[in-house]
Amino acid sequence: MKFLLILSFLFNANKAQIYTKTVLLMGSRFDITVVATNKAEGDLFIDTAIAEIGRIEKLISSWDSNSQISRVNRSAGLKPESVDKEVFELVKRAKYISQISDGAFDISYASIDKIWKFDGTMKSLPTEDDIRKSVEKIDYRNIVLNQNDQTIFLKNPGMKIGFGGIGKGYAADMAKKLLLSMGVKSGIINASGDLNTWGVKPDGTDWTVGITNPLNKKNIFSWVPLKDKAVATSGTYEKRVTFKGVNYSHIIDPRTGWPISNIVSVSVFSPSAELSDALATTVFVLGVENGLNLINQLKDTHCIIIDTSNTIHKSDKLKTNEELP
């Protein structure tokens, strides 16, 4: 899902202006936007955010053999590994999302045996036995956290944890936090659609996100003002395979090994990009009814779901403005 950000602000040489830079970090596109009084100040703020995101990547990347998470994964079934408090607490929060979603979200998803291919090479459905075996090592309940020793232990050999469903959102939150500590009054960290905002535009109005219809990207069906809010979207409309008229998405239920086939897009709005990131996938797996039920129980958290019949479902307290230009 691509977000259409309406950046209609007033440019004035004597006032704060918008400065933006696009970089590749954590294997994804990051668009970093800040409000600053001049280019030198804007560049300093953006470079600081880039350095912070790079720091996070070195801690949690499963692609980096020297990261703390890679060390935890190598010790699966053998011994606990001590990690920084920051990493420990991130895993702890991710495990909590797993618990409240009954495993619809699971950071041990990195253990999956990838039998589904979405590059055009699949010619038939995997067997039931292959699907079952592909998720045998996934189970957040086998992640043992020791608060006193600050260690993480994966009970079973071959288990892995990864932050594909939460890491970019966390990095966006941490970059925002650091910039706020520097006195940056307004900005956006957009991590490939995991987007966190704070402050207002130079003209005093809120940042606004337009949610597009995934089946017709030129059509914006809903506008949502973002004031110190984050939004993340998961979508299946670009990566999927079709067998016997049924579409199978790249988003797979970690409890069953089966792709989700009845939803095309989920957008979640919450106070943090980390939470929005995790919940977007969670709602996808839970489905419309159970997903809305979960979101409606969470404070300051809202969502928009589009199902395969192109029906739009919104959580109870979501405020949108479909009249914005």
Image (cartoon, rainbow, N blue to C red):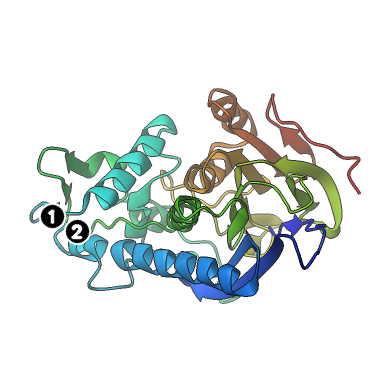
Residue 195 lies, in percent from the top left, at 60, 53
CB under 8 Å between discs 1 and 2 = yes
On residue 22, the disc is none
Residue 18 shows up from this direction: yes
Dot 2 crowding, Cα within 10 Å, few <14, some 14–19, many 20+: many
Name which residue type carries label 2.
Answer: Val
Residue 18 lies, in percent from the top left, at 70, 64
Residue 2 lies, in percent from the top left, at 70, 60
**Residue 160's quadrant in the figure?**
bottom left
On residue 81, the disc is 1
Q: Is residue 15 above or below residue 43?
A: above
Helix, strand or loop at label 2? It is: helix
Residue 53 lies, in percent from the top left, at 43, 64
Q: Is residue 116 above or below residue 199?
A: below
Dot 1 crowding, Cα within 10 Å, few <14, some 14–19, many 20+: many
Q: Depth check: give the residue in front, 151 or 33.
A: 33
Name which residue type carries label 1.
Answer: Glu
Q: Residue at x 39, y 69 (%)?
A: 54
Q: Is residue 248 above or below residue 21?
A: above
Helix, strand or loop at label 1? It is: strand
**Along the polypeptide, which appears first: circle 1 or circle 2?**
2
Q: Which residue position holds label 2?
A: 72
Residue 118 shows up from this direction: no
Q: Residue at x 38, y 38 (%)?
A: 98
Q: Relative to residue 279, is residue 314 drawn left or right?
A: right
